[in-house]
């Protein structure tokens, strides 16, 4: 996983360390993990956080991030 960036990644899938995967509308990578975002009325709104230690990998389509 890339360290903190200002980039918003759309349509991302997070694979957790237990093997379960979950798709998200938009995410923002930080040094400590991933901020989960929703896009509402054309604006990106943060609504959750996933710790880096719980993430195995992040995918955007076919490519790994």
Image (cartoon, rainbow, N blue to C red):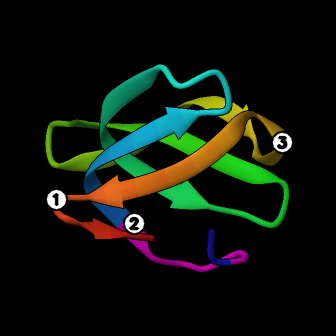
Mark 1 Cα shell of 10 Å, populated few (<14), some (14-19), many (≥20): few
Element on which disc 1 rests: loop
Left or right of 52 on screen, residue 1: left
The secondary structure that dominates the magenta segment is loop
Left or right of 35 on screen, residue 11: left
Q: Residue 13 sits in which quadrant?
A: top left
Element on which disc 2 rests: strand
The residues tagged by marks 3 and 1 sit, at their Cα atoms, a distance apart of 22 Å
> Circle 1 sits on which residue?
61
Residue 53: give its label: 3
Residue at image coords 84%, 55%: 32
Left or right of 62 on screen, residue 29: right
> Circle 2 sits on which residue?
8
- Please give the range of residues in magenta: 3-8
**Who comes first in sequence, dot 1 or dot 2?**
2
| Position of 7 relative to 18 (above/below) | below
**Who comes first in sequence, dot 2 or dot 3?**
2
């Amino acid at each position: 996983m890339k360290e903190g960036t200002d980039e918003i990644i759309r349509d991302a899938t997070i694979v957790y360390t237990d093997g379960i995967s979950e798709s998200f509308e938009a995410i923002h990578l930080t040094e400590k993990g991933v901020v989960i975002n929703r896009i509402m009325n054309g604006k990106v709104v943060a609504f959750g956080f996933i710790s880096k230690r719980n993430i195995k990998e992040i995918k955007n389509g076919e490519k790994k991030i």
